[in-house]
Image: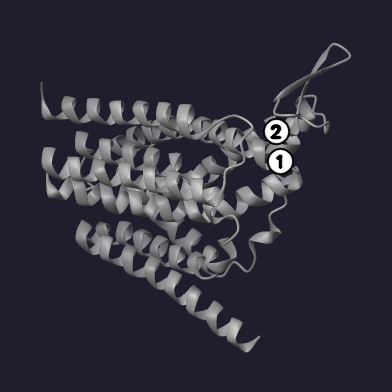
Amino acid sequence: MSSDQITYITFGVLLIGALVFDLGLMSKKNEVVSIKKALIQTLFWVGLSLAFCVFLWVEKTPVVATKYFAAYLMEWSLSIDNIFVFILIFTFFKIKSEDAGRALLIGILLAIVFRIIFIALGIELINRFHWILYVFGAFLLYTGFHLFFKKDEAEFDPGETKIYKIITKFFRVTTQEPHGRYFISIHNKVYFTNLAVVVFMLAAVDIAFALDSIPTVVSLVREKATTSFSSDDILVIYSSNIFAVLGLRSLFFLLKGAVDQFDFLQQGIAVVLIFIGVKMLIEFFGIHLSIGVSLLVIVLCLAGSILYSIQVKRKQARKK
């Protein structure tokens, strides 16, 4: 059995085992997820992701493991940026806490399916047309600057989104209390409940965020713009994406009460996106930055923005 086969089998076994464990033992239906339980689940997913990183270090190479860690860290930080939007969606549709856990899980699983498809399409496009990486680089530059100067996430209104308007236009939707159900029969007609609408919106929002995260990860793991993806690169892209997204649900419950404590995390993520965009564009001139440099920039920007956010909050608290 080859090293690639062992690695993919290990990843598959870990993923299936973790999902069974999470669904069967840690996520009971109609159960409110406490902060303590959310912390345990978050540690479980992060620990599993880091264990897979160690496995890659041993089974593959330190370079592959470093690529995975950098990609996972980037995906994880972008996931935190998703949390606030998720909170707005659940608040807008008045979803009860006991229904939120399963709705989040289904929405995230749908998002993973779509991400797998988009990653496959993206890899194929880049392998055929290397120049598209420079388009991604320009897009990340634009996104980074836009995110850095974005004033308020509260501008996001779930009721005004295109996905919500499409759902309400083509499907019957009821605001009746769902009681954990996704479909309700009214006068022999099937209606979507708000819980089902939330699931679709979570998947759509995550797909929208993937437009930033997938090009970012692609740039991190790819050796040079003119080379094709290796099997190790493809493994790193898929595994880092899937592990980061699966940890979103527990992270949601852990951070929903403290998400406003990290006011400057958005700027930290924006700087990283700008850096990755520049990294992709300068390869046109034959300049290639190593994965070590990329990892250092990611860690410094994210840690710095979090620490600065905490410091500012403390100063504001003292003034009060």
Instruction: Give x and y (percent) for residue 267.
Output: 49, 68
Report if residue 299 is visible in the image: yes
Name the amino acid type tagged 1.
Lys
Image quadrant assignment for residue 288: bottom left
Q: Is residue 315 left or right of residue 187?
A: left
* Quadrant of the frame with the N terminus: top left
Q: Position of residue 113 (x, y in %)?
A: 46, 29
Residue plotted at (71% across, 25% down):
181
Tell which of 198 and 315 is nearer to you.
315
Q: What element does badge 2 sit on?
A: helix
Q: Is residue 62 left or right of residue 15?
A: left
Asked whether, in this view, residue 170 is left or right of residue 187, the answer is left
What kind of colouring is applied to the model shown?
A: one colour
Amino acid carrying mark 2 in the image: Leu
Identify which residue is drawn at 33% across, 69% down.
300
For label 2, the residue is 195
